[in-house]
Image (cartoon, rainbow, N blue to C red):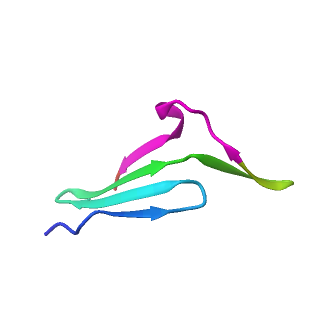
Amino acid sequence: MAAPPYVTVTSRGPVLRATLSSGRLVVRIVLFDVERDPVRYVRRGGRPEDVLRVERR
């Protein structure tokens, strides 16, 4: 039985997760990188292929 999809918001962007009959689908929209020296957020590129990550687990 599939679980409902859900959305979380992380420091780098939203994460969408859904349970499928064959596993889990995870879609991450990586909008920011975190630099450590000095600590700051840096916006990533504007093209979808630069920010979208799709995985089946």
Examine the structure image and report whether residue 24 is included in the region drawn in magenta: no
> Is 20 on the left-hand or right-hand side of 52?
left
Position in image of residue 37 (x %, y %):
86, 54
Q: State which quadrant residue 23 falls in.
A: bottom left
Residue ID at (28%, 63%) = 5
* Quadrant location, the N terminus: bottom left
Residue 12 sits above or below residue 6 on the image: above
Q: Nearer the viewer, residue 22 or 32?
A: 32
Residue extending farthest right: 38
> Is 3 on the left-hand or right-hand side of 50?
left
Residue 34 sits above or below residue 19 on the image: above
Instruction: Point out the stretch of residues depicted in magenta.
Output: 42-55
Residue 39 sits above or below residue 55 on the image: below
Position in image of residue 36 (x %, y %):
80, 56
Position in image of residue 24 (x %, y %):
29, 59
Residue ID at (56%, 32%) = 46
Q: State which quadrant residue 16 falls in.
A: bottom left
> Is 15 on the left-hand or right-hand side of 50?
left
> Is 15 on the left-hand or right-hand side of 12?
left
Residue ID at (54%, 47%) = 30
Residue ID at (60%, 34%) = 45
* Quadrant location, the C terminus: bottom left
Q: Nearer the viewer, residue 53 or 44?
A: 44
Examine the structure image and report whether residue 48 is included in the region drawn in magenta: yes
Q: How many marks?
A: 0
Position in image of residue 21 (x %, y %):
16, 59
Q: Nearer the viewer, residue 1 or 39?
A: 39
